[in-house]
Image: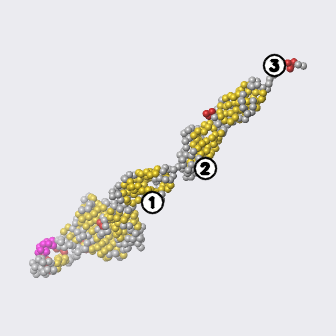
């Protein structure tokens, strides 16, 4: 325990030991005798002659009624005056003497010599023999010293030591001349005289703050005593006398504080108090009575004129206590505000649809997390956040999913929990989402000519543009062509071959609808080019350029090829044909592609086959002179 300064220690001694001349006054009743008074009130019943001498009583066996008898205090019986623990919140431990610390529980009696430690967000309330009610606040260290009563006189002497932390008390009336309630601190000593007060010792033990709400507290240190009356406070620092009392700040106004709280987290706001640099806010169970704050559930300091606690309290009746704190750290008058918490079960946490989510099907499944203690839920779905016209409401069992079929458009949804009585509690925050199915696959068709394919499709509702894929396999796992267009037709240059293609609609935000089924398209070969025909002795030799797998070669006497003389299929870009009779002919070639699809013919080429004279005619001509 910290050592107090010498002036404070001397003052404790002078306050704790009654003056020898102090007398307690007893008012006689019919039948009183000095020996009876001695038996009832004196430490040694045989000391009654000393009482007779002090009061100059001539006949000790007969005392006049309503006579005041002076009894020296040092002759009075002194009996234990145990303190009863009435309430404990959180982590509070105590020990007696050199014993180990152990948990403190309501109902425990303390007889003096105990040390009590309260942890963060913890408190303990005590009831003293003289009726004093005292609460040790969070993070405080309190030691119990002398706890004595003077027999049946009603006088009680109490001495405590507060090393650090806070005390709040409503002290019972201290009866003269020996009754007294004193609290020692490392900085100063506070003597209480039937008062409602607070003491706050800083964590380092160097500063004491005392606030008096009613009655008087005498704060003494460094040889100086300051009397602090109700509505005032003082500050004492180590090595300095107490400061002159200053008026405490007024209590915050109760206007605007809700009497019924139906939503967590627990939150309050109040009007600022002039001169306040911070506020203390506390919550206790029960109703607004003097004993309400024997158990402190919540206790925090905030710089703002408002506070929010994340702690989940059970439903019930509570009291909010707020007070302003001035620049010296003195806490002002209390404002107690009773309220009822009726927030449980809490609304369920909404899962899906999420805020801003888009659903692509008219069938929408809603889901939420189960709320503790909820016996059922009410689900509301509406096209506006006001949940008015077009409202869909479903009263459900304790399930966490529900499906609805909704029209296309914007929607809002929220849910509330039902208690065991079927009462609806607070709504969850609402969430907006949109039902907008993706564009359906357009109806499409394709046509092909040599060198390209032409794709055409219908408009799809909601589509701003379209995507087309084309490849060599039906699953289009490796598309050779991927294009987008705002039009409903697209021409794509392609080599001869068989392809598969599909199309889908794309919305303005880039969302794509489903692909249509892959359809085949066959592009025929292009017309062969650079066709050349050579007339040999007994054959025609034709060659050309092209990329078809096979070709069809035709020979005709007319340019219209109405009745081809010859039609021959070859697998190369050349052909050897039998030489026809002398005359003029036309020859043309066309490619044959996949699945026998034929391309256009090449430009026809004129072929002249000359007549050849017999050998004997040629010999005759040579012999003629």
Element type where label 3 sits in the image: helix
| Residue 170 coordinates in the image, percent (x, y) | 28, 71
The crowd level at tag 3 (other Cα within 10 Å; few <14, some 14-19, many 20+) is few
Q: Is residue 19 left or right of residue 56?
A: right
Earlier along the polypeptide chain: callout 3 or callout 2?
Answer: 2
Give yes or no for residue 534 being in the magenta stretch.
no
Per the model, the C-alpha gap separating discs 1 and 2 is 39 Å
Where disc 1 sits, the SS reads loop
* Crowd band around label 1 with a 10 angstrom C-alpha radius: few (<14), some (14–19), many (20+): some
Residue in the image at 29% along x and 69% along y: 290
User: Is residue 234 at least partly visible in the picture?
Assistant: no
Whether tag 3 and tag 2 are in contact, CB under 8 A, the answer is no
| C-alpha span from label 1 to label 3 | 111 Å
In which quarter of the view is residue 596 placed? top right
The one nearer the camera, 269 or 436, is: 436
Residue named by callout 2: 486
Q: Position of residue 451 (x, y in %)?
A: 66, 39
Q: Is residue 168 above or below residue 439?
A: below
Q: Which residue position is annotated with label 1?
A: 387
The answer to whether residue 155 is seen in the rendering is yes
Mark sitting earlier along the chain (1/3): 1
Q: Position of residue 583 (x, y in %)?
A: 78, 27
Residue at the (19%, 73%) spot, across then down: 153
| Mark number, residue 116 | none
Residue 40 appears left or right of 471: left
**Which of labels 1 and 2 is toward the front?**
1
Residue under the image location 37 percent in, 55 percent down: 376
State the extent of the magenta-drawn residues as a range. Answer: 35-49
Tell me the SS state at disc 2: loop
Question: What's the mark number on residue 615?
Answer: 3
Q: Position of residue 7 (x, y in %)?
A: 30, 73
- What crowding class fits label 2: few (fewer than 14 Cα within 10 Å), some (14-19), or many (20 or more)? few
């Amino acid at each position: 325990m910290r050592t107090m300064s010498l002036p404070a220690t001397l003052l404790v001694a002078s306050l704790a030991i009654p003056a020898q001349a102090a007398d307690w006054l007893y008012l006689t009743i019919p039948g009183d005798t000095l020996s009876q008074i001695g038996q009832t009130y004196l430490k040694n019943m045989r000391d009654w002659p000393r009482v007779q001498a002090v009061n100059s009583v001539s006949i000790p066996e007969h005392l006049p009624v309503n006579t005041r008898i002076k009894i020296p205090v040092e002759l009075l019986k002194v009996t234990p005056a145990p303190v009863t623990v009435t309430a404990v919140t959180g982590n509070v431990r105590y020990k007696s003497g050199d014993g180990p610390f152990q948990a403190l529980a309501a109902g425990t009696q303390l007889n003096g010599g105990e040390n009590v430690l309260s942890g963060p967000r913890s408190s303990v309330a005590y009831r003293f023999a003289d009726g004093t009610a005292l609460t040790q606040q969070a993070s405080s260290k309190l030691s119990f010293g002398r706890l004595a009563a003077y027999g049946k006189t009603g006088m009680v002497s109490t001495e405590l030591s507060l090393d650090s932390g806070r005390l709040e008390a409503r002290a019972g009336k201290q009866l003269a001349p020996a009754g007294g309630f004193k609290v020692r601190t490392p900085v100063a000593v506070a003597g209480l005289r039937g008062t409602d007060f607070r003491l706050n010792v800083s964590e380092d033990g160097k500063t004491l703050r005392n606030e008096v709400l009613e009655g008087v507290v005498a704060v003494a240190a460094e040889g100086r005593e300051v009397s602090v009356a109700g509505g005032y406070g003082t500050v004492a620092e180590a090595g300095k006398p107490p400061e002159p009392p200053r008026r405490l700040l007024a209590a915050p106004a109760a206007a605007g504080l809700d009497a019924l709280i139906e939503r967590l987290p627990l939150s309050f706001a109040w009007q600022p108090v002039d001169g306040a640099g911070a506020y203390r806010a506390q919550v206790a169970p029960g109703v607004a009575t003097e004993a309400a704050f024997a158990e402190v559930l919540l206790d925090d300091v905030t710089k703002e004129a408002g506070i929010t606690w994340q702690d989940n309290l059970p439903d019930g009746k509570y009291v909010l206590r707020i007070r302003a704190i001035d620049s010296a750290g003195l806490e002002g008058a209390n404002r107690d505000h009773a309220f009822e918490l009726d927030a449980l079960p809490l609304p369920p946490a909404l899962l899906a649809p999420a805020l801003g989510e888009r659903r692509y099907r008219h069938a929408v499944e809603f889901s939420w997390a189960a709320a503790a203690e909820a016996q059922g839920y009410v689900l509301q779905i509406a096209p506006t956040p006001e949940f008015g016209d077009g409202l869909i409401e479903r009263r459900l069992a304790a399930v966490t999913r529900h499906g609805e079929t909704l029209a296309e458009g914007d929607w809002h949804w929220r849910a509330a929990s039902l208690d065991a009585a079927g009462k609806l509690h607070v709504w969850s925050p609402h969430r907006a989402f949109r039902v907008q199915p993706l564009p359906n696959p357009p109806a499409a068709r394709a046509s092909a000519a040599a060198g390209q394919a032409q794709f055409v499709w219908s408009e799809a509702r909601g589509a701003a543009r379209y995507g087309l894929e084309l490849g060599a396999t039906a699953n289009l796992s490796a598309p050779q062509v991927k294009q987008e267009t705002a039009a409903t037709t697209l021409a794509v240059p392609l080599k001869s071959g068989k392809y598969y293609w599909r199309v889908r609609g794309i919305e303005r935000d880039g969302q794509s609808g489903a692909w249509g089924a892959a359809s085949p398209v066959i592009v025929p070969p292009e017309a062969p080019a650079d066709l050349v025909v050579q007339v040999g002795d007994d054959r025609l030799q034709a060659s050309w350029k092209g990329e078809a797998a096979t070709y069809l070669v035709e020979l005709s006497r007319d340019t219209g090829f109405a009745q081809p003389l010859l039609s021959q299929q070859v697998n190369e870009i050349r052909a050897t044909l039998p030489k026809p009779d002398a005359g003029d002919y036309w020859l043309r070639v066309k490619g044959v592609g996949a699945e026998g699809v034929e391309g256009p013919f090449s430009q026809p080429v004129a072929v002249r086959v000359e007549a050849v004279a017999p050998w004997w005619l040629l010999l005759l001509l040579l012999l003629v002179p």
